[in-house]
Amino acid sequence: MNKNKLTDFIYAAMFAALISVLGFLSIPLPFSPVPVTGQSLGVMLAGSILTARQANLALLTFLLLGVAGVPVFAGGTAGVGILLGPRGGYLLGFWAAAILIAFMRRQNGKLWHLAAANIAGGIGLVYILGVCWLSTVTGMPLAKAITVGALPYIPGDLFKVIIATLVGSAVARHLPGAKATS
Ligand SMILES: O=C(O)CCCC[C@@H]1SC[C@@H]2NC(=O)N[C@@H]21
């Protein structure tokens, strides 16, 4: 295996582990099947720091571990049932979001570029896939799915955008081969 591939696998494993650990920060909401979770912060950090290829590998590893029964999904859950259940769209959204953020991030770009990428991927894309899936799987009308599956999470996820943008830009500057943001 060449050095670049090894680096990709090491970074992917580190971020799959980070997202899994942040999944234990999970707060159930009584009115929704979707918990507040730290996972999306890990997803935004992956997109903010890794290349698109590394982010893809990280999220693929995270999803495969969860499907294989390792308790990496929110609140220490696992299994294909979670992926096919009401929360599955958010999990697929995580995958797409990490790749989108990494693609949108500009080399030596401004901090607000990274913040915009985190909002587009970590909130926009995750919510679109999550809410549409939630509505389809549960039979909930779309408006209700937006009310219980998106609106309550916006303040917390905007806070995660700020953290991921500041931490991501600082870390990326010091990682070999990573893209710096100023
Ligand atoms: O079951 C899982 O592992 C996925 C949970 C998804 C939670 C979503 S992600 C976007 C929104 N922000 C949160 O803090 N929770 C929801």
Image: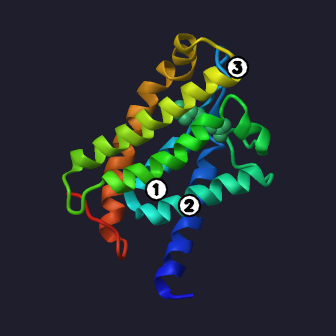
Which quadrant is home to the N terminus? Answer: bottom right
Q: Amino acid at mark 2?
A: Ala
Q: Amino acid at mark 1?
A: Ala
Disc 1 + disc 2, Cβ < 8 Å: yes
Which residue in the structure is indicated by mark 2? Answer: 58
Distance between the alpha carbons at the discs numbered 3 and 2:
29 Å
Residue 46 is labelled as: 1
Q: Amino acid at mark 3?
A: Thr
Tell me the element at label 2: helix
Q: Image height check: is 81 above or below 169? A: above
Q: Is residue 88 visible?
A: yes
Tell me the element at label 3: helix
Q: Indicate which disc, 3 or 2, sits on the residue closer to the N terminus.
A: 2
Q: How many marks?
A: 3
Using the rendered view, name the quadrant where residue 77 is placed. top right
Name the one closer to the observer, 40 or 91: 91
Crowd around label 2: few <14 · some 14–19 · many ≥20 (10 Å): many
The answer to whether residue 168 is left or right of residue 139 is left
Which residue in the structure is indicated by mark 3? Answer: 138
Crowd around label 1: few <14 · some 14–19 · many ≥20 (10 Å): many
Q: Is residue 15 visible?
A: no
Tell me the element at label 1: helix
